[in-house]
Each structure stands twice: as structure tokens, then as C-alpha cells.
Image (cartoon, grey):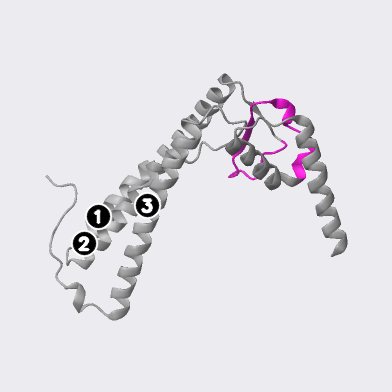
Amino acid sequence: MSILEWQKSEKRFLEQTFEHKLTVVIGLVVFVLFSMTLFYFSYYGFVENVYFDDSLYYIRESGLLAPIIAMTPFPVLMTIAGFQKVFNFRNEKTIKLMVKLMLWAIPLYITLSITNSFYIESKLIGKGYSFCHWYTSPSFRGPDVWLKNDELCLQDGSVIISDIADWFEQKNQQGIEPSVDELKEFIKETRKSRDDYTNYK
């Protein structure tokens, strides 16, 4: 028995109004892009957070990304529903199936996110990383920041979080272990240039 019902629609797609056809086509494109985006973020979450490179000196971690794969029934089934509409099939049961699956997917995503966050945190601690709250955004959605050397977690850097992130990313790419003195000098120069710019304005 097929999960989806492929029953011919009584009204052909080409017989619909222009506005209706345009809405279906735009919706179809949106849900295809949405599906691809969810798959990408889930893949990125697995590669960067679950199977992270433990040679990095600075890691921005979020347990919310990898489990987002659980939310894919929504855009995938809505994409299928769009194709069904275009090819003159009824899509009511596909939409109902999407709603039923999402009732399971939402609590599953929340559960997996919590579990994944604890797993990543324990793995990072096991690899010798330390959580740096000074560089972690206060936003709930913002990724947590972990450092290989906890001495690099400086309070003065809390006001230039984005600059700190860029500086550490350069060090990660170069494979050069940053020193505390280097970071202090960078923070000092960056804050000075910001203050000069503010005073100039």
C-alpha cells in the first residue's frame, strides 16, 4: 500500500485561475529551497558540531542544527503536494499526512536537540575544550563558544564578539595556535579603533 495517494484531481491544473497557478508554482519553489536549506543545515551541524575537527583552537557549537533533519517532513511533503497539484493529482491526503508527521517531528526535534547538545558538550570537554561565556552570544539561538586554551577567554573581548570570532577563525585556518598576548593586543587595538570611530561620528 502506497503511503501517498495518487488520485487524479477533478479539475486540471491548467484550468485553474492564473493567481492560483502562480501561488502553487511559487509555493513549490519555496518549499524545494526550504527542503534543501534544512538538509544543508543538518549536514553542516553534523560536520561542524557532532564530528568537529578537534585540532581547532576555537569552536562555535550549536546542538540545534544536526537534529533539524527531523523537521524535513514539512517542506518535503509540501513539495510533493505541490507537484501533485501541478500534475493533476489530489494532494489533500499528502497535506494531512504532513500535519500528522509534524505533530511527531516537533517534539522529536526538541528531544534530539537537547540530547545532541549534551552529547556535543561532553565530547568537547573530553577533548580538552573549555566553554567561554565571554564570547558566547546572550541570544538563545547563538552558538556556544569553546576554546582549546581557557586562558584565551578574556572579558575584554566580550564587547567585540564578532571581531573575536573572525580573529580566531583566521588562526584556525592558518593552523597557528594563538597566544594570550597576541589576543590582548588585538582586543586593545580593535576597541581603540571602535572608540575612535565612535568619537569621530
User: Answer yes or no: do the residues labelled 1 and 2 have beta carbons within 8 Å?
Assistant: yes
Residue 152 spot, x, y in % from top left: 73, 30
Pointer 2: what residue? 84
Instruction: Tell me what residue is drawn at x 77 percent, y 45 percent.
Output: 159
Instruction: Tell me what residue is drawn at x 22 percent, y 55 percent.
Output: 93
Q: Neighbour class for label 1 at 10 Å: few (<14), some, many (≥20)?
A: many
Residue 128 spot, x, y in % from top left: 61, 21
Asked whether residue 173 appears in the rendered view, the answer is yes
Left or right of 131? Residue 93 is: left
Asked whether residue 110 appears in the rendered view, the answer is no
Element under disc 2: helix
Residue 49 spot, x, y in % from top left: 50, 34
User: Answer yes or no: do the residues labelled 3 and 1 have beta carbons within 8 Å?
Assistant: no
Q: Neighbour class for label 3 at 10 Å: few (<14), some, many (≥20)?
A: some
Specify the amino acid type for callout 1.
Thr
Choose top left, top right, bottom left or bottom right for residue 7: bottom left
Left or right of 77? Residue 56 is: right
Sequence-earlier tag: 3 or 2? 3
Q: Is residue 123 above or below residue 70?
A: above
Residue 74 spot, x, y in % from top left: 35, 51
Furthest residue in direction right, as rendered: 199
Residue 36: give its label.
Answer: 3
